[in-house]
Amino acid sequence: MLVFFIEYCLYEILTAVMQKTIIDTVLIKQSVIEIIEECSFVFPERVRADFDRMLETESNSGAVETLKLLALNAELAEKNRIPLCQDCGTVVVFLKIGQDVCLEGMFLEDAINLGVEEAYRDFYLRKSIVSDPLKRQNTGTNTPAVVHVDIVRGNTVEIIVYLKGGGSENMTALKMFRPTAPVEEIVDFIEESVVSSGSNACPPFYLGIGIGGTADEALLNSKKAVLRDEPNADNYYTELELIIADRLSKTNIGPLGFGGESTVAGVYIKPAPSHIASLPVAVNIGCHSMRYGKRILKGNI
C-alpha cells in the first residue's frame, strides 16, 4: 500500500512538472539586454505618435520648434547610436511571471543584473548607480536593477524594462489625502506637483498616477501606470485623465519648460482598493523620451 502511495505521488509530481512551461533565465537576461539597447537609442512607437499629435495641435510657435528639436535629437540618436539622453537612467524591471512557468538556470535577479551590466558596458551607456545612498560609491556597472515581480495566471513571462532618469525620478510626489477629499483637491495636487517640476523632468511629461492602496502600492502603481500603452479600462478614469491633461495644458510649461500647451504627452491612472481611512495619491513623471520596452517569453513545454 505504501509503495502504491509513493508511486502515485511521484506520478502526480511528474505530471505537474511536465505540464509546466520551462523558461531559462538566460532568455530573460538576453531580453533585458535587447530592450536596454532598443530604448536607449530609439523612441518607442508610442512616443513617435504622441510627438506627431502634439506637433499638429500645439499653437505656440516656440513650443513647435522645441518639439521639432526633440524629434531631431531622437533621429540623430538612432542614426548615430548615441543615447537619447546623457542620463542613461536607473534600470527598473517589471516581471509578470505566469504561475505555470518553471524558471531554470541562474538565479533570476543575477540574470537580470548580468544583462544590465553587459548592456551598459557594450553600448557605452553612462553608469549612474551608487552602492550606498550616503557613501556614494559608483558600482561601475549600473547595477543593481530595481526589480518588481508579479505572479499572474498563465504560462508566459512578460518583461518590461524602464530606464528612469534621475531628473524625472526626483520629481516623484506622494500625498495622503483624507478619504473624503473631493476629486478636485486631488487634481489640484497633481497640477501642483507638475508645476513644481517645471523643466526639471524634461517635458512633455508622461504622467503616471497611482490612487488608492497603501502609500508604497500607490507609488509603485504610479510607475506601472505610465507604462500602460492601451486606454484605461474604466471610463471614469479615462475621463479623469482627460480632465487632468487639459488642466496641465493650461499651465504654459510646455516642451522643456519653454512655454506652450504640450506639457504632458499622456496621463495614466492606476487605481487600487484601499483602507476606508486612507486615500494615497502618487505622481510619477516620465520624461518626453519614455525609454521602455517589452518582451513576452513563452518558453518550452
Image (tube, rainbow, N blue to C red):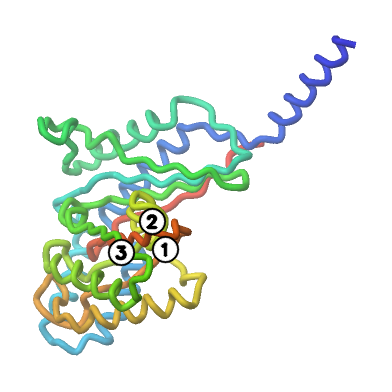
Q: Residue at x 62, y 47 (%)?
A: 154
**Callout 3: 10 Å neighbours few (<14), some, many (20+)?**
some
Residue, x 22% and y 73% (percent of image)? 191
Disc 2 target residue: 221
Q: How many marks?
A: 3
Query: If you read the primary sequence from the N terminus, does the residue marked by circle 3 or circle 2 appear first?
Result: 3
Q: Nearer the viewer, residue 47 or 81?
A: 47
Q: Give x and y (percent) for residue 256.
A: 13, 70
Image height check: is 194 above or below 95?
A: below
Label 2 Cα neighbours within 10 Å, binned few <14 / some 14-19 / many ≥20: many
Mark 2 belongs to which amino acid? Asn
Dots 3, 1 in contact, CB < 8 A? no
Mark number for residue 177? 3
Q: Identify the residue at image location x=36%, y=80%.
A: 242
User: Which label was assigned to residue 270?
Assistant: 1
Between circles 3 and 2, the one closer to the viewer is 3
Are the residues tagged 2 and 1 within 8 Å (C-beta)? Answer: yes
Element at label 1? strand
